[in-house]
Image (cartoon, rainbow, N blue to C red):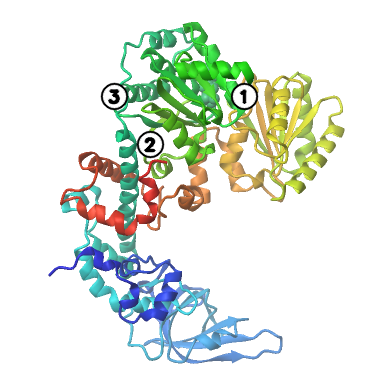
Amino acid sequence: MTRRSSDLQRSVQYLKGVGPRRAEKLARIGVRTARDLLYHIPHRYEDATTVARISALRPGDDATIIGRVVSKGVIPTRSRLRIFHAVLKDDSGLIECAWPGQPWLDNSIRKGDLLLASGTVGFYHGRQMRPREHTLLASAGDEETESGRVFPVYRATEGLNHRQIRGIVEDNLDSLLLEARDAELFGPEWLKAAGLMRLPEALERLHRPETLSQVGPAVRRLAYEELFFLQLLHARARYQYRSREAGLSLDAPPRLTEEFLSALPYRLTAAQQKTWQEIRADMESPSRMYRLLQGDVGCGKTVVAAAAMVRAVDCGKQAVIMAPTELLAEQHQRTLTALLEPIGLAPALLTGSVKGKKRQDVLEDARSGRASVIVGTHALIQDGVGFGSPGLVVIDEQHRFGVEQRRALRDAGGAADTLVMSATPIPRSLALAVYGDLDLSVIDEMPPGRRSVITGVRGPGDRAAAFEFLRGQLAQGRQGYVVYPLIDESDAVEAAAATRAVEELSALFPEFRLDLLHGRMSGTDKDAIMRRFLAGETDVLVATTVIEVGIDVPNATVMLIEHAERFGLAQLHQLRGRVGRGGEQSYCVAFYSGDGPPERLRAFAGTNDGFEIAREDLRLRGQGNLFGAEQHGLPALRFADLDRDYALLEHAREKARTMVEADPDLASPRHRPFARVLQERYADHAALYAVG
Ligand code: ADP
Ligand code: MG
């Protein structure tokens, strides 16, 4: 009888050398089943294949050695410093190792222990070393460990040190690897196409590599599996969404659409053209569109979305666009009115502030289908709002809406196609991982002739000059922003600090009008202040909270960012995107406090390209912070590195989508093992099956 893969689901408790008490401790590091142990990734390796012979060491060498402890103890010194020392011996000679200030090592290191140590070799009455690092490879009683191998070091937990964990892995590895032979999910052709080794081989190399270079390919194999199941979850969510109701085929003759495009005062950029064709093809096809349109601020997403809206109207349907705030909704309303008026369309506005008779009219026009284009906030998804013949739903700045709100708008849209827009560029790898259930359209090019914002990074000594520069711009009738980071978690402290800052600035710029915007204000107050700034009634806006993503004040040409080192790279770029919206040259000055600008600020000044910034952000902050698996309800990635494994991610996505399209329920004998894995290992992420 062959074992079924699900046997690896048995509790780790039943493995050799574990038992209930150790099982409890292992659970603390996430190891609950036999499979968890098999997939438990060492957090580093000690490479004993490059170990030096003690007799061959020369003063000044930086070396790794392995030796038995032949004597040890704590040496008292005249000062308070106590030094633990141990003499290590291999078959060629002796070396004395010293750990100043670590007398407690005397309790954990025993005579007869086999130690691996690395550090610089010195010479004083004999060879000496102050180990930078050391690892206990085996205790006095253990069997001799072969040298010339690579030792995995597992993360320890209270009551189980890394050697004990390694012992448990070693005791069970051979039998678990036998079981893993039957747990291989991917066929030989598949693995070959992706350039991957088989599962048992990968797992063996993970825990028992012969050389360090074997580890990388093993991790890649396991990363692929992880990425494949992530994409399988996404593919299922996507399939459910697209098939839930018959979608619409918005394929009537594009009369208005052509009129709209030819009336534009400019030609679409190649990137706009490409994304527009992607969206159009989706709309014309009978399955529902669920697409993300991504692009840096100012790349021209709005006109592409507008074309899609007109396409819906061409087919006798309504187009609805939802923005996260009233101000943004009003701005869309103005922009869309300017764009659509030439073809005889007048967008209606529905926000919380639209009241009385006006509101009744809009609601009635929405319900009857008379309003063909409707712009609004989440007021669009409140009770009592209905759409007569929705064809396209556009969600702007989608990350600012909760899953529930997005779902509600999509439901309100019935079988309508959905386009979500984001002005926060993220690298494609991250987008595929997080938004894998959406199709992706990216505008990665700016309209021609756009002047990029000139960015400076300045130290504490340059503030006066920068403020003089701001004064010069204000004197020419321009406006500017001064932004402070959130000073404290508490709103009260934030408000106080911001008030102080605005007082100081008022003293500095007595001839100009300043206004303050901070997190403690109500939505209505914030809106009023933004409106005054937009109307040019104030010259300088001092703000602590991030100013409205997406708000356009074309006359603002200066952005001063205080304590810029406290902002993330993506955030800095968003702030910079608030200027350079008009025809004038714009400037951004990032002040840092402290000795020198951190690497992040230099990267910021180095480019205006949002996607480049996003890649740099991923590199500097690591995927853990950006991927935020839990936040998205996604399974954590333990083996995959989104940057390194980008090609694998693409491959996994293709495969997962093909599989789900061919067999949505994964019911065929060939696909059933995949369904079982979803059930066994990904039950917690079932929320993804329900479309978010
Ligand atoms: P986004 O919504 O991506 O931030 P917008 O759609 O607001 O960008 O476009 C920014 C500005 O660029 C607008 O003033 C718009 O009229 C202009 N624009 C858009 N596409 C083009 C183009 N292909 N050529 C010239 N200008 C363009
Ligand atoms: Mg815009």
- Give the x, y percent position of residue 256: 40, 9
Residue 655 vertical position relative to residue 146 in the rendered view, above or below: above
Give 690 or 460, whichever is nearer the viewer.
690
Quarter holding the N terminus? bottom left
The image's mark for residue 285 is 3
User: The residue tagged with tag 2: helix, strand or loop?
Assistant: loop
Give how far apart the Cα atoms at labels 3 and 2 are: 16 Å
Mark 2 or 1: the one toward you: 2
Q: CB at mark 1 closer than 8 A to ligand 2?
A: yes
- Give the x, y percent position of residue 238: 33, 38
Task: Residue 605: tell me if it is visible.
Answer: no
Q: Which image quadrant for residue 199?
A: bottom left
- Amino acid type assigned to the residue bearing label 1 in the image: Asp
Give 597 or 259, whichever is nearer the viewer.
259
Q: Residue at x 58, y 42 (%)?
A: 569
Mark 2 and 1 residues: CB-CB less than 8 Å, in contact?
Answer: no
Residue at the extreme left:
1
Within 10 angstroms of label 3, few (less than 14), some, or many (20 or more) residues? Answer: some
- Amino acid type assigned to the residue bearing label 2 in the image: Leu
- Give the x, y percent position of residue 622: 49, 51
Q: Which image quadrant for residue 292?
A: top left
User: The residue tagged with tag 3: helix, strand or loop?
Assistant: loop
* Residue holding disc 2: 438
Within 10 angstroms of label 1, few (less than 14), some, or many (20 or more) residues? Answer: some
Q: Earlier in the sequence, mark 3 or mark 2?
A: 3
Mark 3 or 1: the one toward you: 3
Q: Residue at x 76, y 43 (%)?
A: 495
Task: Residue 170: tell me if it is visible.
Answer: yes
Within 10 angstroms of label 2, few (less than 14), some, or many (20 or more) residues? Answer: many
- Amino acid type assigned to the residue bearing label 3 in the image: Ser
* Residue holding disc 1: 552
- Give the x, y percent position of residue 625: 51, 51
